[in-house]
Image (spheres, rainbow, N blue to C red):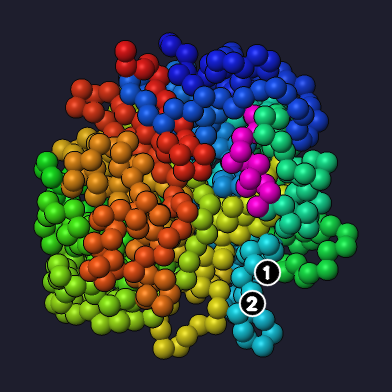
Amino acid sequence: MAAPALAAAPAGATTTPTPTAAPTAAPGTPAAVPLVERGTRAVAAHPPLKRPVATGRGGAVASVDPDATAVGLEVLSRGGNAVDAAVATAAALGVTEPYSAGVGGGGFLVAYDAATGEVTTIDGRETAPASLGPTSFLDPAGRARPFPELVSSTLSVGVPGTPATWERALREHGTWTMGEALAGARRLAERGFVVDETFRQQTLDNAARFRDFTSTAQLFLPGGDAPAVGSLFRNPDLAATYALLGEQGAAALNGGELGRAVVDTVAAPPVAPGVTREVLRGGMTLADLSAYRTVERPSTVVEHEAADGPVQVHGMAPPSSGGTTVGEALQVLDALGRSDDPVVSEHRKLEAAALAFADRNRYVGDPDAQDVPTAALLSQAFADSRACAVRDDAVLPRPVAPGDPAAPVPCAAGTAAAAGDEGTSTTHLVTADAAGNVVSYTLTIEQTGGSGIVVPGRGFLLNNELTDFTTGPADPAVPDPNLPAPGKRPRSSMSPTIVLRDGRPLLAVGSPGGATIIGTTLGILADRLDRGVPLARAVAAPRVSEQNRSAAAGGAAAEPAYVDSPRGRALAALGHVFTPVPEIGAAVALEVLPDGSALAVAEPARRGGGAAGVVRPAP
Ligand code: GLU
């Protein structure tokens, strides 16, 4: 097998070789690497080369990070399948993107199985501990607590679902054991990765709250400062955590030694001496961790009329709102029809997104805690009733009211209250193998840096996912499917997506970015499927996130290049309101080309640029 495309050191690297998946013995044979000191050491190294686009055969991986992509490619080149590679890449992202994803968080995995032709999904969303109730996030007077207090606390830590997701994915769809799949990430944690600008900046952005916790400051602020660009960052504690998970499986967390460490940290976070602010505590128990279960859910699916024929768009069902919201918006677009006028086409997309967001906010939450009308939200009849309110010469006043999927009223579009937000962190990856299996996987610890609390001696951050619940007081006048409750999963926006044509994979796509994920995913799909934009350009294109916000609340967030384009100006003249934000999302995507080869795509610039690779690059 050819070496992974990204494993070679870039020209100019003269000292430490790029620390990535090492060519080693059989899977599962842990490399004999001596324990090294936690933290960083200075080396004259460069981060590995990043390529945002790769085309070829034998399998493909795209992620936000070159080391993680290389780990996934290594798995594929040694015979692992797309699911093995997805788990390996995700675990490597836990090393190199520890502020976005890892053992302490959750996520959603969507997989196409070439042998059966089926798309399955694993819901690995964090759950609320049994002690969490509807008023847990309020102060004693019943008022909302300041959001930052909830973020950097253990009150917002959900029971992690990521190790259980990896275990289930490998057991049901993979060919490698957990120990085998985590071996590359373990080596990466032991040997270290080269710190880049993005990692240093993310550390600096979090430095104030990281200092509040001794375990976090020790790991991420060695010597009191964020690791220097070009230094080697090692995390032997995380390597040991991966070794434990490899030996014991997810049980190490869901009831075992790691779980006890999490429970102890939630009960008594290692607050640094001299910190005066109150660090809110949660009440997670070992029983909560033992009770955690991933859930296999049917994918959401809509038949979409793309420019060159129908496709089936598979997404993540509730408790993520990704599948229903992207799916409903596509159904509305089908009802409206395509336009070759770029302004009209984009206007229709924004209107469709606003309508779908109104319905998301009203109806989508954890389906195991209340009824969620998933099928009705995705029906063409409901989409038709929503679409007929859209006009090409005017903008629907925001916020648009939700419709009633149980009894659709054609063309109704009053105004309504808007809903909460999610963070802007998280990470997405896509993998494909030579047999045609494809994975689209989004994982997160919520905020960049999660709760800010590293489990002492274990090398990973705890999530703050429970802030995705409605954290303010319930409004009796506004039905809210996302109120906190024991054991409940908070609503997500993560949108791992796989598009099939004639039963075969065509695209896989997803992004981080909290509630903006939905607009990013919809935008890439609309560009690629409806407007014939090549995938790499669709991923790089300027972004907008229409979330049905009033003009007073800022309207739609949009990147400056979107707002300042002729199309953006024409949309504003029509009545769309945009608030410029520097950057939205960090998507990765994959397309199966007509000749069967794979096109893997990552960001050319956002979040410092991502990394796409294939096992055998096209000549
Ligand atoms: N917690 C968010 C969600 O589940 C994701 C966070 C992010 O992407 O920043 O939708």
Residue wearing tag 1: 149
Q: Nearer the viewer, residue 148 or 261?
A: 148
Query: Is mark 1 in CB contact (under 8 Å) with mark 2?
Result: yes
Please, is residue 415 above or below residue 41 in the view? Answer: below
Q: CA distance from mark 1 to mark 2?
A: 7 Å
Percent of width and height locating residue 369: 45, 70
The reply to whether residue 67 is in sight is: yes
Residue occupying the point 77% across, 29% down: 41
Looking at the rendering, in which quadrant would you find the C terminus? top left
Q: Which residue is situated farthest in the right direction here?
A: 273
Magenta segment's dominant SS is helix
Q: Secondary structure at mark 1?
A: helix
* Tag 2 residue: 145
Q: Against 433, is 468 above or below? A: below
Q: Look at the numbered disc 2 and say if its residue's Cβ is closer than 8 Å to ligand 1.
A: no
Range covered by the magenta-colored residues: 194-205
Q: Quadrant of residue 374?
A: bottom left
Amino acid type at circle 1 is Glu
Residue 247 shows in this picture: no
Query: Helix, strand or loop at disc 2?
Result: loop
Quarter of the image for residue 94 reads top right
